[in-house]
Amino acid sequence: MNDHHIILGIHIGDRLQKAADVQKVFTEYGCNIKTRIGLHDVDDRSCSPSGVVLIEFFGSEDEAAAMMGKLDEIEGVGVQKMVFRHER
């Protein structure tokens, strides 16, 4: 059992143009992604060009940092990390 939970928030400024690049990184780290939730605004007239993906990351903080680095290299993509540690 991990002694922590790592949550990554990934903001994609232009989903239509950058989704394939982001998905390539997600595929590379597929075994480290425990949960993935995509969020974007949508209504009956439009679908937002930007969005946020939340990842529950399984692995070390170093592995998460490596994934974050690859995502940060994609223009228009920003990543933030939250770490929740278990109290013993």
Image (spheres, rainbow, N blue to C red):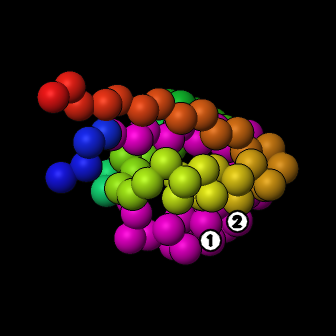
Quick check: 83 left or right of 13? left
Residue 49 percent across, percent down from the top left: 68, 41
Q: Is residue 32 above or below residue 88?
A: below
Task: Check contact, mark 1 vs mark 2: CB within 8 A.
Answer: yes
The 10 Å Cα crowd at callout 2, few under 14, some 14 to 19, many 20 or more, is some
Query: Which residue sits at x=50%, y=41%?
Result: 8
Please report the bounds of the magenta region as a residue range.
5-33
Q: How far, Cα to Cα, is label 1 from label 2?
A: 5 Å
| Res. 37 in view | no
In the depicted view, which residue is nearer to us: 51 or 46?
A: 51
**Whether residue 29 is situated above or below residue 74 in the rendered picture:** below
Q: Quadrant of residue 86?
A: top left
Residue 74 appears in which quarter of the rendering? Answer: bottom right
Residue carrying label 1: 24
In percent of width and height, residue 80 lies at: 60, 34
Residue type for callout 1:
Lys
